[in-house]
């Protein structure tokens, strides 16, 4: 054995000094994770773990939509009416009475909106859909006259693909799972009202109970996260509802002036679709233009498009920033990605909830290290000259 034992040699560092070094000594196994490749592997494992946990959470939410959807809706309604609850409590109104009054107001508002939708669309929906289809057919006929127009087979293939996607189980899985059956709808509604009652009555106490295990900076961060979540969700709901109402009234006035038929159901659809940012306004404008195309011709349809663009520009540049503030200032690219992911995962309900959830996530990042101090990685970098 002594013949194969490596003898230490010396490495001269400077005149008069030497250090024995064992040639052939192996590195400790854990030191392999300390170099560049090891750090990259560690980070990759961390990313895979986060992705796996996120996927498991999304899968669980999809399996429990009958619970998660009412929970999120109740949280959104509670955030929207939080200022009213605070105002009543500050004036000595008992918490139970304030909660019951707020629930009554919410029920009246939702009932009124539902009645308006049914009244406006019930008798005119067949005519509206027929004119929209006729307008689409006329538009496709004009497109085929262009020199670069697609063939009729290509148009039919694209139309079939779009219809297959819209009617597929993947597109509507969230809505079908949550409110597809009458029994599930009633169960979800009752659950939402019950959760909303407790959120309105005991919301601050419930959040304080959740934060009990935390102390110091972690506790302060939890308080900031709770306050920011309520602030962002409340601003989103109140602002979006106001913007939707203004959009509907503006487009309604324009359609009446242009003498476009079915202006009331079109205005109602504008109000409803306004809760889906960017995409909703586009769909409402296309539908209004198609109806105008069939009823009044190309010139009138172009005027309708102009009215829709004008109203959307006024809303996006003036009304929305004023009502929602910087807390909802998300880039259009982020909104489109959130809408896509929400639609694929939750259908129509996911499309409606995707943007406020993304806004809450960004708001939490903005207060992670302080009231006005974002997380370190989200802070703007200042250029040095």
Image (cartoon, rainbow, N blue to C red):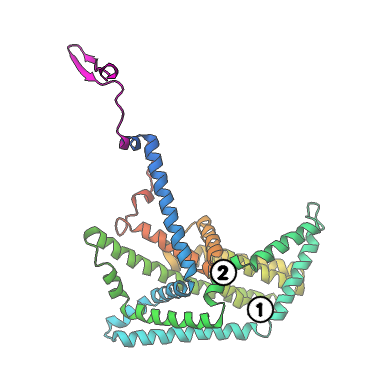
> How far, Cα to Cα, is label 1 from label 2?
32 Å
User: What is the magenta range?
Assistant: 1-30
Q: Is residue 88 left or right of residue 355?
A: left
Label 1 element class: helix
Whether 276 is among the magenta residues is: no
Q: Quadrant of the N terminus?
A: top left
**How far across and down, in percent of the image, does residue 285 sit?**
64, 68
Residue with the mark numbered 1: 263
Give the tally of numbered discs: 2
Mark 1 Cα shell of 10 Å, populated few (<14), some (14-19), many (≥20): many
Whether 8 is among the magenta residues is: yes
**How far across and down, in percent of the image, does residue 24 sit?**
31, 22
Residue in the foreground of this view, choosing between 373 and 70 = 70
Name the mark nearer the viewer: 1 or 2: 2
Q: Quadrant of the C terminus?
A: top left
Hey, which quadrant is residue 130 in on the image? bottom right
Q: Is residue 2 above or below residue 327?
A: above
Q: Earlier in the sequence, mark 1 or mark 2?
A: 2
Residue found 55% across the figure and 83% down from its top: 182
Q: Is residue 73 above or below residue 183?
A: above
**How far across and down, in percent of the image, does residue 300 sit?**
73, 70
Q: Is residue 154 above or below residue 111?
A: above
The residue positioned farthest toward the left in the image shown: 16
Residue in the foreground of this view, choosing between 367 and 68 = 68
Residue found 67% across the figure and 71% down from its top: 288
Q: Does residue 329 appear anywhere in the picture?
A: no
Q: Is residue 117 above or below residue 362?
A: below
Q: Is residue 309 left or right of residue 359?
A: right
Residue found 39% across the figure and 61% down from its top: 363
Residue with the mark numbered 2: 173
**How far across and down, in percent of the image, does residue 127 sit?**
72, 80
Q: Is residue 164 left or right of residue 325?
A: right
């Amino acid at each position: 054995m002594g013949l194969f034992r490596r003898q230490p040699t010396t490495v001269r560092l400077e005149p008069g000094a030497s250090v024995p070094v064992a040639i052939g000594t192996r590195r400790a196994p854990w030191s392999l994770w300390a170099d560049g490749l090891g750090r990259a592997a560690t980070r990759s494992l961390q990313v895979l773990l986060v992705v796996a946990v996120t996927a498991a959470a999304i899968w669980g939410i999809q399996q429990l939509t009958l619970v998660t959807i009412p929970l999120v809706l109740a949280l959104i309604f509670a955030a929207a009416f939080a200022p009213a609850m605070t105002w009543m409590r500050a004036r000595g109104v008992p918490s139970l009475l304030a909660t019951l009054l707020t629930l009554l107001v919410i029920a009246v508002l939702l009932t009124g909106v539902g009645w308006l939708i049914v009244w406006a669309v019930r008798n005119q929906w067949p005519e509206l859909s027929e004119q929209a289809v006729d307008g689409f057919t006329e538009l496709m006929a004009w497109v085929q006259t262009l020199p670069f127009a697609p063939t009729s087979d290509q148009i039919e293939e694209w139309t079939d693909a779009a219809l297959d996607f819209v009617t597929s189980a993947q597109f509507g899985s969230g809505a079908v799972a949550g409110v597809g059956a009458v029994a599930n709808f009633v169960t979800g509604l009752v659950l939402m009202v019950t959760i909303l009652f407790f959120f309105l009555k005991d919301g601050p106490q419930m959040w304080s109970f959740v934060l009990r295990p935390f102390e110091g900076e972690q506790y302060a961060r939890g308080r900031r996260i709770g306050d920011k979540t309520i602030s962002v969700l409340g601003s989103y709901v109140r602002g979006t509802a106001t913007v939707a109402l203004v959009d509907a009234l503006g487009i309604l006035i324009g359609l009446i002036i242009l003498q476009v038929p079915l202006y009331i159901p079109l205005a109602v659809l504008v109000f409803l679709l306004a809760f889906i940012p960017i995409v909703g306004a586009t769909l409402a404008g296309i539908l209004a233009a198609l109806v105008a195309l069939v009823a009044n011709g190309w010139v009138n349809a172009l005027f309708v498009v102009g009215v829709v663009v004008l109203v959307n520009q006024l809303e996006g540049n003036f009304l929305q920033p004023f009502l929602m503030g910087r807390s909802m200032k998300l880039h259009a690219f982020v909104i489109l990605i959130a809408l896509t992911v929400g639609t694929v995962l939750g259908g129509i309900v996911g499309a409606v909830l995707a943007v406020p959830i993304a806004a809450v996530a960004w708001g939490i990042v903005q207060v992670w290290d302080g009231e006005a101090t974002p997380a370190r990685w989200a802070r703007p970098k200042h250029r040095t000259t």
